Image: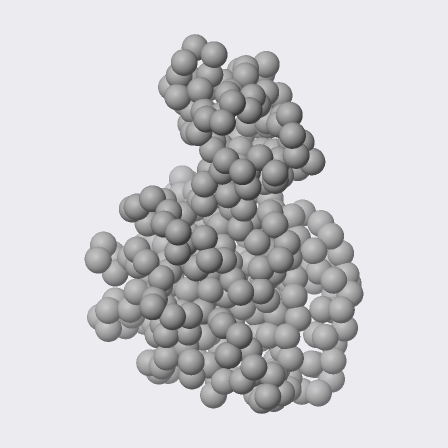
């Protein structure tokens, strides 16, 4: 497969720059094979069954963007990719010249970071204080690069799911942004169960695919946790005839990565799983997800899940019907294709 097979033309005005007025007021495109249905996200309970299980990614977005200067005076922009130790992080560093090991970067508040080493396109940094404390104090919310504005006060809450609790992501699991407390109450009354995984979304999710063939691409690794309670909830859903519905591609990747080792078991691990058409899904039966970037690994993932032709038709329909795209945009409810295409 070629990466160009996953390209499409998107009018710039369809890229959502702001969240909808209220959570749950976005549109929802139901994709079931060749059938498409236009709905609203508040209609989600009509697409779920009492025996179903919703699995959510409870990662919390950290203020991962930092600004500072080298000793030479050169301006530096840092985007933390992941926190690796209490006082260390891997980051993308943008500067006029790539900083060498031993370089000190002084942040705008005077805190000095040390460059330890380069790791491919990332830089390992040492912080003089706990990383999360520094980020919370002086960091900025890392809105995606396709949102062409600085973060506003409202983004502090809206670029975060209402169930976020484990800090570590530098991008939101955006399918979850549509949920609010009222919707969860409705689903609970319907008998739909919920469970959680944690996958800390890295900045690599926005990195372009720079190769021509899909097989050449290598994913950035991300850390995830699958709790025993969620494993038990999945087995219970299966036993009662329910479906496992992943809220977001990050949830799906965590579940499928864990299942790739054999029987589904609780674990904390790293994954660089790359799901492309032809993949044999082992856990997830339905997927709630936003619309994804052209030529992206996530577009390849949803094509694997729902079928390439179904996704092409869904995206063409969404563009014609003026759906809003990407992180603050509208959503899809995808039924898993019987046969990968």
Q: Residue at x 50, y 85 (%)?
A: 45
- Return the residue found at the far top: 72
Q: Residue at x 42, y 80 (%)?
A: 42
Q: Residue at x 60, y 83 (%)?
A: 188
In the figure, residue 234 lies in which quadrant? bottom right
Q: Residue at x 47, y 88 (%)?
A: 46
- On screen, residue 9 versus residue 172, left or right, reads left
Nearest the camera: 338 or 231? 231
Q: Is residue 15 visible?
A: yes
- Relative to 135, say whether 169 is above or below: below
In the figure, residue 38 lies in which quadrant? bottom left
Residue 132 at x, y = what percent? 61, 40
Residue 238 at x, y = what percent? 70, 81
How is this picture coloured?
A: one colour
Q: How many marks?
A: 0
- Relative to 264, say whether 245 is above or below: below
Residue 119 at x, y = what percent? 58, 28
- On screen, residue 199 versus residue 322, left or right, reads right
Residue 194 at x, y = what percent? 64, 75
In the figure, residue 85 lies in which quadrant? top right
Nearest the camera: 240 or 303? 240
- Relative to 198, say whether 282 is above or below: below
Q: Is residue 315 visible?
A: no
């Amino acid at each position: 497969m070629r990466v160009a097979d996953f390209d499409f033309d998107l009018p710039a005005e369809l890229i959502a720059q702001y969240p909808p007025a209220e959570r749950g007021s976005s549109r929802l495109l139901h994709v079931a094979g060749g059938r498409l249905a236009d709905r609203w996200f508040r209609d989600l309970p009509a697409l779920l069954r009492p025996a179903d299980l919703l699995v959510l990614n409870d990662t919390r977005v950290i203020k991962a963007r930092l600004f500072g200067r080298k000793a030479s005076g050169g301006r530096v922009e840092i985007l933390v990719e992941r926190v690796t130790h209490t006082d260390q992080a891997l980051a993308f560093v943008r500067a006029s010249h790539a900083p060498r090991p031993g370089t000190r970067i002084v942040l705008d508040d005077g805190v000095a970071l040390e460059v330890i080493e380069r790791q491919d396109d990332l830089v390992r940094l040492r912080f003089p204080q706990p990383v999360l404390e520094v980020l919370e104090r002086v960091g900025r919310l890392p809105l995606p690069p396709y949102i062409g504005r600085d973060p506003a006060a409202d983004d502090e809450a809206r670029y975060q799911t209402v169930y976020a609790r484990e800090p570590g992501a530098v991008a939101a699991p955006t399918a979850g942004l549509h949920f609010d407390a009222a919707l969860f109450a409705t689903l609970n009354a319907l008998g739909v169960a919920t469970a959680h995984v944690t996958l800390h979304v890295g900045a690599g999710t926005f990195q372009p695919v720079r190769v021509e063939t899909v097989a050449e691409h290598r994913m950035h690794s991300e850390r995830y946790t699958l709790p025993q309670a969620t494993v038990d909830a999945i087995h219970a859903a299966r036993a009662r005839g329910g479906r496992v519905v992943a809220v977001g591609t990050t949830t799906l990747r965590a579940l499928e990565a864990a299942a790739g080792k054999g029987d589904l078991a609780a674990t904390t691990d790293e994954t660089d799983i790359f799901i492309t058409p032809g993949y044999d899904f082992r856990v997830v039966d339905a997927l709630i997800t936003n619309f994804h970037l052209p030529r992206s690994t996530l577009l390849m993932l949803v094509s694997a899940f729902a079928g390439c032709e179904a996704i092409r038709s869904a995206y063409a329909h969404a563009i014609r019907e003026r759906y809003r795209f990407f992180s603050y945009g509208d959503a899809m409810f995808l039924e898993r294709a019987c046969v990968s295409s």
